[in-house]
Amino acid sequence: MTLTSKPLAALIFIILFGGIAFTTAMGWFATESTKEPTTFTEGEFAGLANPADIRGSYTFGDIEKSFGIPSAILAQAFSIQTNDPAFFAIKELEVIYAASEFEVGTASVKLFVALYNGLPLDLSTDMSLPENAAALLKEKNLTPEQLAYLDSHTIPNPAAASDSLEPAPVQVTESAPESASTEQLIKGKTTFQEVLDWGVTQETIEQVMGVPMPNPLTKIKDYCLEKRLDFEIIKTALQVEADKVK
Amino acid sequence: MKIFGKRLFRPRSIWIRKIVQWFFFLLIALISINHTLIENGGGIPFLSTASLHALCPFGGVVTIYQYAAVGTFVQKIHESAFVLMIIGFALAFLFGPVFCGWACPLGTVQEWIAKLGRKFFKRRYNQFVPARLDKVLRYLRYLVLAWVIYVTATSGTLIFAVYDPYFALFNFWTSEVAIGGLIILSATLVLSVFIERPWCKYACPYGAVLGITNLFRVFQIKRAESTCKADGACSIMCPMNIPVDKVKTVRDHQCISCLECTSEAVCPVAQTVVFTTGAVK
């Protein structure tokens, strides 16, 4: 069989776009990471989205989709004034609350979502919430233990948050891994290899985690979920080790 | 070809290839612009907002090791890149590296600049690198490929993106582009005035992967010795400097299946250089 240019061009289009159409129909042609947290697998909350799996790359819109909490409520809780709160990326909170004595970031959103929806979350670590968020949560049916935790972990609202956020774009989503590697901050996408590259030894990592380190290319967060370890605790402990070797 | 001042044969070009190249260039350019717009709250309706990494089949190649080792993709790489890699391999198995010759926008841009080079240097164009040096340099892209696969496998990050001229071409307006990528892109564009497709010939790691399929692809470029006039037109026209007039079947790892050497284009004798599965006499 001999081919000339026109049938070849047609075949290129058919195979390429036919392949894309087929894999799209099968749900295999994903061009971005899914923004859906894992769900509880057992107990009375089985099947519901797990706030512990909320990641810094999520926007308020993603939280609204998975947990049903309106973006406007989330914006109110964290004092974010923007025209479209659904596009606000959670990782931006760390920047806005940078001046605060206590860290407000992804963990804070996890705490807020868990308490707002009455979902379980490990409260053994320190997670801070601003006054607005605490006020919203106190309208909910919280247990005395949760109320006590809230009272001891509430910080003032940020003074300049509203002024600093005009259009609230999702502008940081792609740059996150780069900043993670340059700033040496452990985030949801950080792999063991990155921590090793920063100078933390395998022995130290295994000591912190209490389990053997897997393939270094594995994401720390994925491994914590697999081994049922609390990522927030491991992250904080590894961050301490990473800061030591800076 | 002229005899007594009269033109007997006018070399044609594969015009449909030019249209296909324009199509893919515009498609990728618009998607890249749309990706930037969507991050700023805008966007072009009905057009993909995917990042360039998500639409690069080479992304699939570099993530193979990590996928096999831990079941995840390298950062910024998604399932779509894996799918495109498989489609790219299927096309290459059938037709050779048609992705390079027909779809790759960086190859297209290099060809556009080549027109300028041809205008300046006439027949000297694309003949500047000494043959012996050129032959050695052609294997450089396999070293680049090995390096890219190694650093991606050991770091789990897309380190090549920092040097990738293709990424720089469609992201030069964003903060994501690295100075290394811009320098290599600029060097590629400048060299294209003297050499046709310099990036493809000497450095492209994806071209290196696809080029291997020239050894066993289903459709091959074949030359019928019985009707060949041995005028060398096919070799002169080849953007990759392959001596088509010296072989019966083109198995050179650099062929990009552009068909510019065939009887449909530059070869003046019908059915002499053809793209076929069968034998030719």
Image (tube, coloured by chain):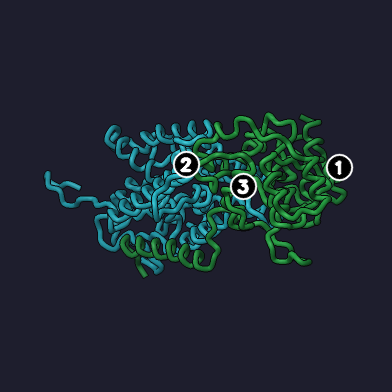
Chain colours: A green, B cyan
Mark 3: secondary structure: helix
Residue B23 image offset from top left, x and y in percent? 35, 52
SS label for mark 2: loop
Q: How far apart are the alpha carbons under marks 1 and 2?
A: 43 Å
Q: Please state which amino acid type lies under the numbered disc 1.
A: Glu
Indicate which label's residue lies in the foreground, 1 or 2: 2
Looking at the image, which is closer to me, A232 or B160?
A232
Whether pointer 3 and pointer 1 mark residues with C-beta atoms closer than 8 Å, the reply is no
* Residue for badge 2: B40
State the residue at coordinates (71%, 44%).
Answer: A134
Q: Amino acid at mark 2?
A: Asn
Residue drawn at (44%, 41%), measured in percent from left and top?
A: B170
Residue B53, horizontal then vertical, whole percent: 53, 48
Tell which subunit mark 3 falls on: A
The front one of B221 and B144 is B144
Corner quadrant of residue B193? top left
Circle 3 sits on which residue? A74
Q: Amino acid at mark 3?
A: Leu
Calculate the distance from the C-alpha at mark 3 to the C-alpha at mark 1. 40 Å
Which one is closest to the eye, mark 2 or mark 3?
3
Position above or below: B199 against A100: below
In the depicted view, which residue is nearer to us: A141 or B267? A141
Q: Chain of mark 2?
A: B
Who is closer to the viewer here, B217 or B105? B105
Q: Which chain's residue wears label 1?
A: A
Please tell me whether mark 3 or mark 1 is closer to you in this view.
3
Q: Is residue B69 visible?
A: no
Q: Which mark is residue A203?
A: 1
- Distance, label 2 to label 3, CA atoms, is 21 Å
Badge 3 local density, few (<14 within 10 Å), some, or many (20+)?
many
